Amino acid sequence: ENTGLSLGWNIDEPESRHELPPPGEVDVLVVDERQKAAQRIAHGLADTAQVSFIAGNEAVAEHVREKNYDLVIISLSMTEVDGLRIVSRLRSFEESRHLPLLVIVDDDEKGTRQLVRALEMGVNDYLIRPIDRLELSARARTQIRRKRFTDQLWENFHMSMQLATTDAVTGLYNRHYMTSHLETLVIAARQHRKPLSLALMDIDRFKVVNDTHGHAVGDEVLQDFARRIARNVRGVDLAARYGGEEFVVVMPETGLQDAGRICERLRATVADDPFRVSTGVELDVTTSIGLAAFDPSMRKSSALLDLADSALYAAKNQGRNRVVF
Ligand code: GH3
Ligand code: MG
Ligand code: MG
Ligand code: MG
């Protein structure tokens, strides 16, 4: 019962909030050339993780890159292998730069020197021989818990980034991302005197699709439309949903002539095959495309969009299903 002063937090909290997964789902690697020592560590962690061994060698870093270990424990008292070198290599690879590393040193002067170097290289924790089983388990679990927690944070971060830059209906980039990226591309085009083209696409008579078949079918058409665009642009091009049934394709280092060919391909990929929707209906869809090229007299990236918009307006006026620049 709590009778005394409340400190305002529960000391069990870190453990309970970030509960470790079952041992079968946690992977620990022990690097030690002496099998007996490695087995003792595995035994000490039996309740926590699946432990695999590797006799220390230069291949450790490469091996670790391909797996997703929760923790790597490296003995620094190996004789054949330089454990510090392994630490250094692991820290130099992007994939293992933040991987939890725990080193084991002997309780002597050499061990102390090695430990200082290891800590300077960024190991997360250490144990000094003789190893206490409970201490091993506690230190290992702390690192594993931290790894799982930061993995979760990264996953959330990437998910937020994805949500912030992607259009939910089509999976293409959204308008916000496109306009900020266009700004960067315009600056690059000006600086390096490289061409840059932009196509503004608008689905023809899309209101009729919605009015005739319903909004849900309209959304399906948008999705198929986006897929066709994505398939027919190059890796360097940026395809985005600009608004309701308007899309933008930005083509870096591309002049009007090449961009015109790409746009004609985009127009045809929409017009040539009917859109099959889930109700079983086949719809003939066309798109008008306004194409514009960057020129250095443009003060702002929005000028490029305005020019493409005028071309699009002309494409609509001239009868739709065409590319105008
Ligand atoms: P035009 O050839 O002149 O472009 O004719 P249009 O009918 O395509 O043009 P208008 O701008 O009059 O209509 C666009 C329609 O697009 C209106 C709106 O109902 C529809 N729309 C916009 N956003 C969405 C969406 O997210 N889903 C669906 N299903 N329809 C949308
Ligand atoms: Mg429109
Ligand atoms: Mg319109
Ligand atoms: Mg339209």
Image: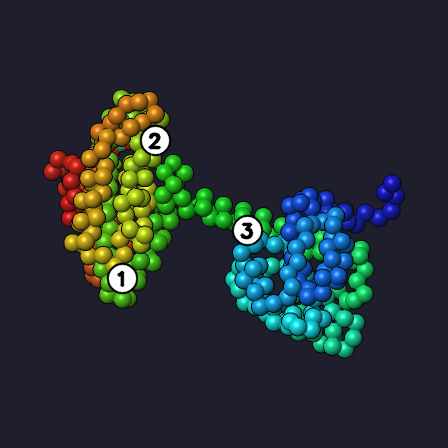
First along the sequence among labels 3 and 1: 3
Residue placed under numbered mark 2 in the picture: 219
Residue placed under numbered mark 1 in the picture: 189
What amino acid is found at the position of numbered circle 3 in the picture? Trp
Q: In the drawing, does residue 138 fall left or right of residue 190?
A: right
What amino acid is found at the position of numbered circle 2 in the picture? Asp
In the rendered image, which quarter is residue 78 located in? bottom right
- Ligand 1 visible in quadrant: top left
Q: Position of residue 167 (x, y in %)?
A: 39, 41
Residue 154, labelled with which disc? 3
Q: Residues within 10 Å of mark 3 (few under 14, many from 20)?
A: few
Q: In the drawing, does residue 7 fall left or right of residue 317?
A: right
Q: Are marks 2 and 1 in contact (CB under 8 Å)?
A: no
Judging depth in this view, the residue of 158 and 278 nearest the camera is 278
Which residue is drawn at the image coordinates 69% and 43% (left, top)? 22
Judging depth in this view, the residue of 235 and 208 nearest the camera is 235
With respect to residue 174, does 84 lie above or below?
Answer: below
| Ligand 1 contact, mark 2 (Cβ < 8 Å) | yes
